């Protein structure tokens, strides 16, 4: 007869319990991260407990639990002891969920946060040539996407054959992505007055992705866009600038495109627009809409073709090292969609352990695309950290835009200090207090290429590829080397969940011990 040691049986049962517990924690954590990414793309809020439950249910099916066994967790006839055990789930995930919420809300909140101090800065005065076509670039008071704005701006301004102005509804300092502040050249009224004085008219308006403006400003922008279109101006939206253009009514009944991640929301909100995907831009007469972010460069080149000629557009593409220009027509692009590996951005937003406070040094004469590449790539399109514009005073970009830093290097408390611009890399400005300067643009190439390589090398390749995907920028010819995945950021929520579980178990043990020590009132009787 075989004798079983009860201690061995208990140890085996404890081991199985711990293994299954860890498996469930991992499954629930992945459910929270993966489904949180999906909800973030299609819904206004997060559904934490649905994420957790779905992750747990999927893993129970993987472990070959039957459907009734899973459903019993959600029926009213569940034994009370299982209800108590199920209540452990939110307690286990409370710590990782709280850390994720704080970090994610903080990063998104900082991305277009207006500065708190009052700064007096004025744009540089420029001569207006009525012989040249005039293009206005719209910004909103609550912010605009830096790449959507500065990409087509450099394409057009770099030709030297176009009057280019950044305009806003009112005189103010406007935040761009990642803590970069721009001083608009003109208000709507000032532009109107300038055109009247020069006997000129506006030829095109470029609309980048805007942070939702106040109702009064939104009404002003819509009226101004309709007025310019009625006067004959070409209206061009970049990325989700299509939302602003659609809200004005100028896209009703027309074909249009936008960023692949936002098209489902646009279809829902503006059903009268014929939304399409898989193309760099849609040219429909006096309206052009482009796909996501860097597709705005193609939109800028199309404006050059329309207002000037194809040879000037080809030269403009070469000047900014854009390798994907197709003269005279819109290039086809992949119809992207969310996939499981895109959870990398949720991991970065929630648990990134790499250098996260990134200073971007503003230097005189920096290229507009060089500047945009540093501010959007590490924030909105990879979520690895926060950027802040640092410098000693107001600077002018290569083509005359005015930018204001938010801090000095010494006062910013930085983990990294990045210096964009090929000219800055050649000059090597005098070193200041703080981290060692890292010069992003050492060679003549498209401004985003070295930034994506830095993302892969400093963080991981998957993050760099996600950034390229959301920028709608093909990187097949860009060599990305580094770690394959953000393993440290993946491990953090698992460890936090285990910590939550340990604290929950400890709290239960203490509670039971206290109850055991409590005197029974019947003992006295």
Image (cartoon, grey):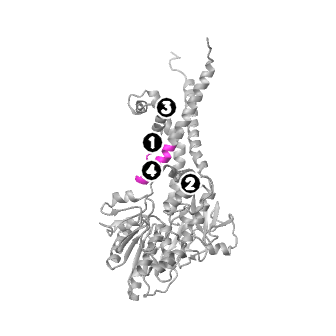
Q: Which residue is mark 4?
A: 38
Please tell me whether residue 443 is drawn above or below residue 191 in the rendered image.
above
The reply to whether the C-beta atoms of the residues labelled 4 and 2 are less than 8 Å apart is no
Inter-mark Cα distance, 2 to 1 = 28 Å
| In magenta segment, residue 36 | yes
Tell me where residue 351 appears, x and y as whole percent: 57, 50
The picture quadrant where one finds residue 370 is bottom right
Q: Nearer the viewer, mark 3 or mark 4?
A: 4
Please tell me whether residue 77 is drawn above or below residue 301 in the rendered image.
above
Report helix, strand or loop for mark 1: helix
The reply to whether the C-beta atoms of the residues labelled 3 and 4 are less than 8 Å apart is no
Q: First in sequence: mark 3 or mark 2? A: 3
Please tell me whether residue 523 is drawn above or below residue 213 in the rendered image.
above
Q: What is the tally of numbered marks visible in this picture?
A: 4
Tell me where residue 274 appears, x and y as whole percent: 32, 63
Q: Which residue is mark 1?
A: 49
The reply to whether the C-beta atoms of the residues labelled 2 and 1 are less than 8 Å apart is no
In this view, the residue in front, 82 or 304, is 304
Inter-mark Cα distance, 4 to 2 = 18 Å
Q: Nearer the viewer, mark 3 or mark 2?
A: 2
The magenta region covers 30-49
Q: First in sequence: mark 3 or mark 1? A: 1
Q: Which residue is mark 3?
A: 85
The reply to whether the C-beta atoms of the residues labelled 3 and 2 are less than 8 Å apart is no
């Amino acid at each position: 007869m075989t004798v079983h040691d009860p201690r061995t049986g208990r140890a085996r049962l404890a081991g199985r319990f711990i293994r299954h517990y860890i498996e469930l924690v991992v499954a629930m954590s992945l459910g929270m991260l993966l489904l949180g990414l999906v909800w973030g793309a299609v819904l206004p809020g997060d559904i934490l407990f649905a994420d957790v439950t779905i992750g747990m249910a999927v893993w129970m099916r993987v472990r070959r639990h039957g459907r009734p066994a899973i459903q019993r967790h959600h029926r009213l006839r569940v034994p009370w002891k299982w209800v108590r055990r199920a209540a452990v789930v939110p307690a286990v995930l409370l710590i990782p969920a709280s850390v994720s919420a704080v970090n994610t809300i903080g990063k998104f909140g900082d991305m277009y946060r207006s500065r708190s101090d009052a700064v007096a800065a004025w744009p540089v005065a420029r001569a207006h040539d009525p012989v040249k076509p005039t293009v206005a670039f719209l910004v909103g008071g609550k912010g605009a996407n830096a790449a959507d704005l500065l990409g087509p701006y450099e394409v057009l301004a770099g030709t030297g054959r176009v009057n280019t102005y950044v305009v806003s509804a009112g005189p103010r300092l406007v935040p761009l992505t990642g803590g970069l502040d721009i001083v608009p050249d003109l208000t709507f009224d000032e532009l109107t007055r300038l055109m009247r004085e020069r006997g000129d008219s506006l030829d095109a308006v470029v609309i980048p992705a805007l942070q939702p403006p106040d109702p009064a400003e939104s009404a002003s922008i819509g009226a101004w866009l309709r007025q310019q279109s009625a006067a004959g101006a070409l209206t061009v939206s970049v990325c989700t600038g299509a939302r602003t253009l659609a809200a004005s009514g100028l896209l009703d009944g027309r074909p249009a495109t936008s960023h692949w991640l936002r098209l489902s929301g646009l279809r829902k909100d503006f059903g009268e627009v014929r939304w399409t995907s898989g193309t760099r831009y849609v040219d429909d007469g006096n309206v052009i809409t482009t796909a996501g972010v860097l597709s705005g460069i193609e939109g800028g080149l199309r404006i050059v073709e329309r207002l000037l000629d194809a040879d000037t557009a080809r030269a403009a593409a070469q000047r900014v090292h854009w390798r994907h220009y197709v003269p005279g027509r819109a290039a086809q692009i992949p119809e992207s969609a969310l996939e499981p590996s895109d959870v990398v951005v949720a991991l970065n937003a929630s648990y990134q352990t790499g250098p996260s406070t990134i200073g971007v040094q503003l230097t005189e004469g920096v290229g507009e695309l060089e500047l945009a590449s540093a501010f959007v790539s590490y924030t909105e399109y990879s979520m690895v950290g926060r950027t802040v514009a640092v410098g000693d005073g107001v600077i002018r970009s290569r083509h005359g835009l005015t930018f204001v830093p938010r801090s000095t290097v010494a006062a910013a408390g930085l983990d990294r200090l990045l210096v964009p611009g090929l000219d800055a890399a050649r000059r090597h400005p005098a070193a200041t207090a703080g981290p060692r300067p890292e010069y992003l643009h050492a060679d003549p190439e498209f401004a985003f290429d070295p930034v994506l390589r830095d993302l892969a090398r400093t963080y991981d390749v998957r993050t760099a590829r996600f950034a390229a995907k959301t920028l709608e920028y093909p990187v097949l010819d860009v060599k990305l080397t580094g770690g394959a995945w953000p393993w440290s950021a993946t491990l953090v929520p698992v460890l936090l969940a285990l910590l939550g579980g340990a604290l929950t178990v400890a709290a239960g043990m203490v509670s039971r011990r206290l109850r055991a020590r409590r005197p029974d009132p019947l003992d006295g009787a």
